[in-house]
Amino acid sequence: MGHATGGLVAGTFVAAFVEFVEALTIVLAMALTRGWRSALAGAGCAALALAGFTAVLGYALATWLPRSVLQLVVGALLLIFGLQWLRKAILRSAGRKELHDEDLAFARRRAAGAQAEVRQRFGLDWFGFVVSFKGVFLEGAEVVFIVVTFGINAGNVPVAAASAAAAGIVVAAVGAVAARPLSAVPENTLKYAVGLLLATYGTFWSVTGLGALHGGASLVWPGGDWALLVIFAGWLALSRLLVGALRRAPGSLSRQPTDEAERVA
Amino acid sequence: MRMIRGLGRFLFDFVVGDEWRIAVGVVAALLIGWVWLAAGAPVAAGVVVTALLMGSGFTVTMLREGRGRRK
C-alpha cells in the first residue's frame, strides 16, 4: 500500500467515523423521541442521496478536469477544508474553544424532539424524518467532500468510498448495540489527526498542481512521495507550536485543556 | 435566484468555514508560488517556498485569532 493509498484509507475512515458519530447522535435522539421508523427512514434517504451525490460529483470532476488542474483546484480545496479542521482542533487543545460534547448534543436534540408538535406525512412523523435526514446529509456531506477530493487525487475514489462506508457500518453497528451516543469516542483527537492528514495531502497536491499554470505538467516535489512525511511533520510541529503559543496568550478557558496534539504525536 | 444564492452561501460556509483568512492565505501562497516559478525560479525551490508560505499564512491567521476573544 503506497503513501497515498494508506493516507487515503486512514483519512477517509477516521473522518467518516467522527462525522457518523455526530450523525448517530441526531438519529438516536429522534428515534427515542419521535420513533425509530421516521428516524431510520430519514437516515436511509440521506444515505441514498449522499451515495448519488458522491457518484455524480466524483465522475464529473474526474472526467472534465485535466490531471494537473484537478490537483491544483481539488488540492487547494482539500487544504482549506483540512486547515479549518486543524484550526478548530488547535483552538480546542489550547483551551480557546469548548470540546465537542456528544452527551450535551444528545440532550439538546432530545429536548427539541420532545417539544416539537406531531405532524404526519407519508405515514411518517415529519419532524423526526426531516431532522434525521438533515443531520445525516449535512454530516455526510463533509465525508463526501473528503472522499471525492482525497479519492480523485489519490486516483482511487472506490477505496475512499469503501473506507467511509466501512466507518458508517461500524458506527451504526456500535450505535445499535449501545443505543446511546458514542460519547467515549475521542472525537476531538480524531479530528486533529484528520486535520493534519488533509492539510498534508492538500499541501502536496495543490503545490503539485501549480504545474497547470507553469507549462501544464504536474510539478514534482523534492524526494517525490517521501515529501508527504516531511509535510506531515511540518504541520504537526507547527500545530504544536501554535497550541503552546495560544495557551500562553490571555483568553484561554480556565479549565485545563485536553491536549489532542500530544496524543496524536 | 434565492435558491442559487442560498446554495452559494452554503458552499462558501461549507468549504471556507468561519475563518475566511485561511482560504485567502492558501490562495495567496499559490499565487506567489506561481509568479515566482513564472519568473524563472527552480521548481524545487518554488515548491518548497510555496508550502512554507502556506504554513506562514496559517500561523499568522491563528496568532491573529489568538489575540481576539475566545469562542
Image (tube, coloured by chain):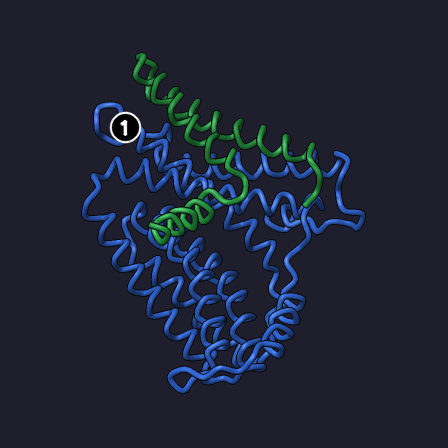
Chain colours: A blue, B green
Above or below, A61 relative to A46: above
Most extreme residue toward the right is A254
Depth check: A111 or A196 in front?
A111
> Percent from the top left, x then y, of residue A80?
45, 40
Q: Amino acid at mark 1?
A: Gly
Most extreme residue toward the front is B1
Depth check: A241 or A265 in front?
A241
Q: Which residue is mark 1?
A: A211
Above or below, A39 relative to B1: below
Q: Within the image, what quadrant is residue A153 found in?
A: top left
Depth check: A94 or A227 in front?
A94
- Residue A121 shown left or right of residue B19 in the figure: left
Dot 1, how many residues are within 10 Å of its Cα: few (below 14), some (14-19), or many (20+)?
many
The number of callouts visible is 1
> Percent from the top left, x then y, of residue A140?
43, 62
Most extreme residue toward the bottom is A123
Query: Could you tell me which secondary element the residue under label 1 belongs to?
Result: helix
Q: Residue at x 53, y 37 (%)?
A: A235
> Percent from the top left, x then y, of residue A232?
49, 39
Above or below, A112 relative to B28: below
Q: Within the image, what quadrant is residue A79 found in?
A: top left
Depth check: A194 or A138 in front?
A138
Q: Residue at x 69, y 35 (%)?
A: B68
Q: Residue at x 48, y 72 (%)?
A: A132
> Percent from the top left, x then y, of residue A18?
52, 61
Name the chain letter of the residue that bears numbered label 1.
Answer: A
